[in-house]
Image (cartoon, helix red, strand yellow):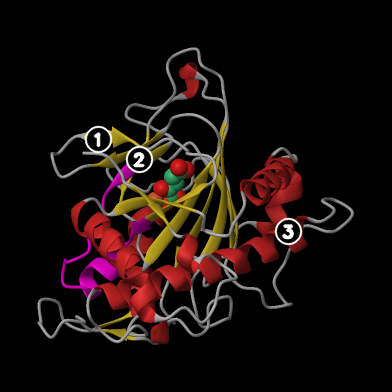
Amino acid sequence: MNIPVVDFDVYRVGVDDVADEKLNVLCKELKTAFTEVGFVYLKNTGIAQQEVDAVMDISKKFFLLPDEAKIPFYRGNHAEQNHGWVPSGTERLNPLRACDLKEAFNITSLHPSVKWPSEEALPGFREMQVSFFLRCKDLSLRVLRILGLSLGLDPEVFTSKHTQVGGEQNASTFRILYYPPVRAESVEDGQVRCGEHSDYGTITLLMQGPGEGLQVLARSGDYISAPSIPGTVLINIADLLQRWTADVFISAKHRVLLPSPGDMSTRQSVAFFLHPDDEAVITCCNGVDKYPPVKALDYLNERFKDSYGRK
Ligand SMILES: O=C(O)CCC(=O)C(=O)O
Ligand SMILES: [Fe+2]
């Protein structure tokens, strides 16, 4: 089984006022992908590869700063807010493994009070991250609208619970990730770059640097490779949307293992995790009561306890 590539041109970012009938093919293709695999590569999204490359370049500059320069932005393990810097070896996406060998910076709020590296330290960093956050927000809400339509529901069934993305009352996060070179002698037993996990929120947009690394758990029970395909955005269903759809859409597990011994290459990716508004109550959308209603923020906080440890 492969991860399908779907053409999003008809509803790409920037195209508005498309009649719902014109979205029929797209609805069908996405529904198939998300009920069978949980992941899809979208091409012609309106987000250009050059934009992704530029955001990766400036992100790498951040990660290569000395730790002292990044500490002021430290997220903390029991933070009220997800915004900020996550040093390598702090988060474990698979709680049964040692901490992941990856470093990240989360952009969760666009509020002016939020702390950013200064313009002197990293010219253009804040502006580029904010503008990319907004591009991802736009694309993810388009995908969500298609998903509502594809289930024969009100097209705004999901988007109507995502009204404050980028604000203080919504946990959606744009995350830049850096996987430093792996030194075999300092790797703990079972430690990997990113442990097996499924994402927590509604959907995730992922763009990877060149090469292999990401693997997705297929229905067969085998992990399949999900390399970067330049010019595409990889989209996956996350756990809360699986629950919301009473398991119609699948939130597939994925991971990044270690490179082969002696391979000292680094890896980069950027991800946008779309979450419902904090106070949104998520109830199965198709009239069944497979899962009890849950408040989006309560659900997320429970999941963070797995990856950062319980107090
Ligand atoms: O870096 C990657 O390719 C995957 C990262 C990921 O799955 C995550 O942060 O949730
Ligand atoms: Fe993930």
Residue designated by label 3: 128
Residue designated by label 1: 223
Q: Would you place residue 85 above or below residue 27 in this image?
A: above
In this view of the protein, which residue sits in the foreground, 25 or 299?
A: 25
Are discs 2 and 1 less than 8 Å apart at CB? yes
Find out if the beta carbon at label 2 lies less than 8 Å from the nearest ligand 1 atom: yes
Is residue 309 something one can see in this rendering?
no
Q: Would you place residue 63 above or below residue 250 in this image?
A: above
Q: Which residues are magenta?
A: 236-255
Q: CA distance from mark 2 to mark 1?
A: 9 Å
- The quarter of the picture where residue 109 lies is bottom right
Are discs 1 and 3 less than 8 Å apart at CB? no
Is residue 211 something one can see in this rendering?
yes
Would you call the spot at circle 3 few (<14 residues within 10 Å), some (14-19), or many (20 or more)? some
Would you call the spot at circle 2 few (<14 residues within 10 Å), some (14-19), or many (20 or more)? many
x, y (%) of residue 198? 31, 53
| Quadrant showing the N terminus | top left
Q: CA distance from mark 2 to mark 3?
A: 27 Å
Amino acid carrying mark 1 in the image = Tyr
> Does dot 1 land on a helix, a strand or a loop?
strand
x, y (%) of residue 215? 33, 37
Residue designated by label 2: 255
- Residue at image location 30% in from the left, 77% down from the top: 149
- First-in-chain label (2 vs 1): 1
- Residue at image location 54% in from the left, 32% down from the top: 210
Q: Is residue 254 magenta?
A: yes
Amino acid carrying mark 3 in the image = Met
Q: Furthest-top residue in view?
A: 262
Left or right: 79 with respect to 276? right
